[in-house]
Image (cartoon, rainbow, N blue to C red):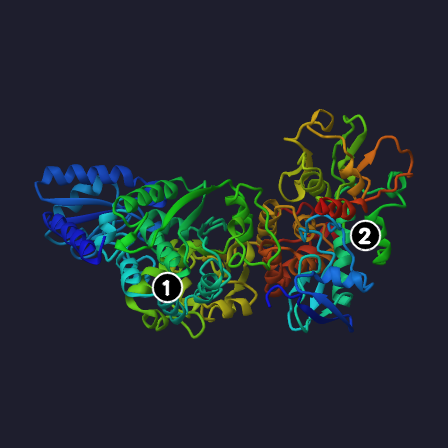
Amino acid sequence: MSDAVEVKTLIIDGEEVSALRGQTILEVARENDINIPTLCHLEGLSDVGACRLCLVEIKGSNKLLPACVATVFEGMEVSTNTERLQKHRRMILEMLFAERNHICSVCVSNGHCELQALGQEQGLTHIRLPYRNPELNVDASHERFTVDHNRCVLCTRCVRACAEIEGAHVWDVMGRGINSIVITDLNDEWGSSTCTRCGKCVQVCPTGALFDKSKIGSDHPKYPDFLPYLNLMREAQ
Amino acid sequence: MTIEELEQIAESVRLENAKFDYEVNVCMDLACASQGADKLREALVQAAAASGKSILVRKTGCMGPCSAGPLVKVDEDDTLYSHVKAENAEAIVSSLGGTPVPELQCELNEHFDKQVRVVLENAGHIDPEKIDDYISRDGYKALMIALIEMTPNGVIHRITESGLRGRGGGGYPTGLKWSTVAKAGGDLKYVVCNGDEGDPGAFMDRSVMEGDPHRVIEGMAIAAYAVGASKGFIYVRAEYPVAVARLTTALREARRRGLLGNNIGGTTFNFDVEIRLGAGAFVCGEETALIASIEGRRGTPKPRPPYPAVSGLWGKPTLINNVETYANIAPIVRNGGKWFADMGSERSKGTKVFALTGKIANTGLVEVPMGIKLREIIEVIGGGVPDGHTFKAVQTGGPSGGCIPADMLDIGVSYDALLKVGSIMGSGGMIVMDDTSCMVNVAKFFIEFCMTESCGKCIPCRAGTAQMHSLLTRICEGVGTMDDLELLEDLCSTVKEASLCGLGQTAPNPVLSTLKYFREEYMEHIQHKRCPAGVCKIEAPAEVLA
């Protein structure tokens, strides 16, 4: 019977839902139109549980679990939007806004930005934390794309898209802690790196950190939805 | 290799040693070596040759009270000499067989009387580079007993019975961890020793690896037999070159003696160990980051579950224990679980090694039974705070721990009691602070450590510790406000609850515990622009600002 499909039932925010064994809380919640905020998660990429926005409470445990990687179990009771979680989510977003130089009015992603949207969704009205205002570089050496580290939130979606989907592994993370930064190859200029110019990283970037040079102003929506389709087609082959 | 062969080796070592009339052990651990133990040993060898007596001069690992170094122990009657210089060599040699040299004798009887040595039982008695020395003190006997007389389940049962809990800091029951790995499926499993000791002020694991490396290897081999693994890794930080060298020598000697490799003890059990060096990242002491580092990837932690016991190194079931945990295994297997469980407190069994540092008379390594009062460790074993200063706080558990104030010194040292007062057992660093320490500055120091050691993967730890550091800096500079304090407390809560791994989850502990017990110092900085201990440089005097 080990190959048989195992169905679990659980409760998310008071609603009874069903799930397959091995499904994550996030998958089940989204299937049932229950919103859990995410930033580093993207359908089609592996999950790293790094942004901590999708933390949820499980009844009987004091520990908060990231919904993107925590799998369901029978009888689980999940709360996705308690006061405690909201407080942490707002604080995490505040940390992100204060960490680098996020100035929406001059950003190509203004109006299409996931960080901006999360701030609005979580009711963030002002930042209490002191802005760190770091001096960071903009690398425009690539003929088609630009990376502006001032707007990077280190979600590592570009790193994963490049390694897992494109198979090039041009992007990676350098440095430690607050000094971490995404790099191409071994910290070479993007333009002279081994980049395949596929542009997937730009499409999956949630903010205006990676953008297409041909776009002007804030006219730069991104289309990260191709990943699940691409994965599905590859699996079919 | 069989038990009989081990006993033959032990016997031959005893015969060899019996050729000498006297044994003089010189501590060659870093602290003593830096105070001239090398020259002292040479002088002792020369003096021994000149005296005509037959004397064995042996270099050993750490004997304990580093502040009294260089240390020399005469094995005949266990006379311990402290602060020995090369000039004293002749006096010591000529005293052998007569009365000990009075002015050099170590007066730390109380210091030693309160201690119980399990992990450090060989410290100061064996040459860490000689496997035969270790064998002569019952070394590898436990491995042979396990392999020949016990089933893997029997070994796990004995460890469970002992009540041993992980000595790396978390205090997870070792027997439970072993049985989880043993039950995990698959032919290929790994055993890993975490020797990435990185807490400021902690050096227990270094001393064990340098002073008694075979004890760690034996513990790992027994663990591998119990859980069904055939391959082990010791992850040591590269900042411990002596430990790496000693372990390398120890592994080579163990292989040559047939105690590692194929068909150990004539059984079907195969096991070998490789050393992996850490590249200077504190976070690699976290087990999932350590695994990533051994695999050759960037040392960043992963969310658990899955735990390494199910999916660890290269996705295989992996047992990860700390150096000190493995060092406890051989004596437990030899003497039985009950023997170990008879020591310590109700839920924390056995002994624990602590590294006493800071403002305390006897700095160095101590091993005490669990449940001993903090006051006894600090005032009796540690000799109290020197130079007429008064005790203020003791910081346990390194950057993940908290500061415990003077009126709480009567708690017994155990995992649960320390957690209750807002600190942790941690790996065993104990930093004593007196009235010259500013607690706000101490909190800032530890947050700065966590900030620079954060891997940067999750946001709360990466950005949160940096924000906490800048707020604490403001308070220390006398420009902090009450709003800053409130924000600091909010940050502590999010960093503690939302961070991915133990580094972030425990990073606020030093701030939280100092806020709890020394809040008035924060208030002095904020409201009166004054540092009570006089550590923080606040430029404008209180009157001008008021």
Instruction: Find disc 1 in the rendering and name its residue.
Output: B152
Between B242 and B532, the residue placed more toward the observer is: B242
Give amino acid for label 1: Pro
Disc 2 element: loop
The residue that mark 2 highlights is: A127
Task: Give how far across and how far down residue B141 sits, in percent.
Answer: 26, 58
Q: Chain of mark 2?
A: A
Residue A194 in view: yes
* Left or right: B363, with B416 as reference point: left
Is B143 placed left or right of B306 in the picture?
left
Characterize the local packing of mark 2: few (<14), some (14-19) or many (20 or more) Cα atoms within 10 angstroms.
some
Residue B335 screen position, x and y as percent: 29, 67
Q: What amino acid is labelled 2 in the image?
A: Ile
**Residue at the spot 35% in from the left edge and 41% down from the top edge:** B248
Question: How far from the left and from the top, in percent, is residue A203?
Answer: 80, 40
- A189 and B27: which is toward the camera: A189
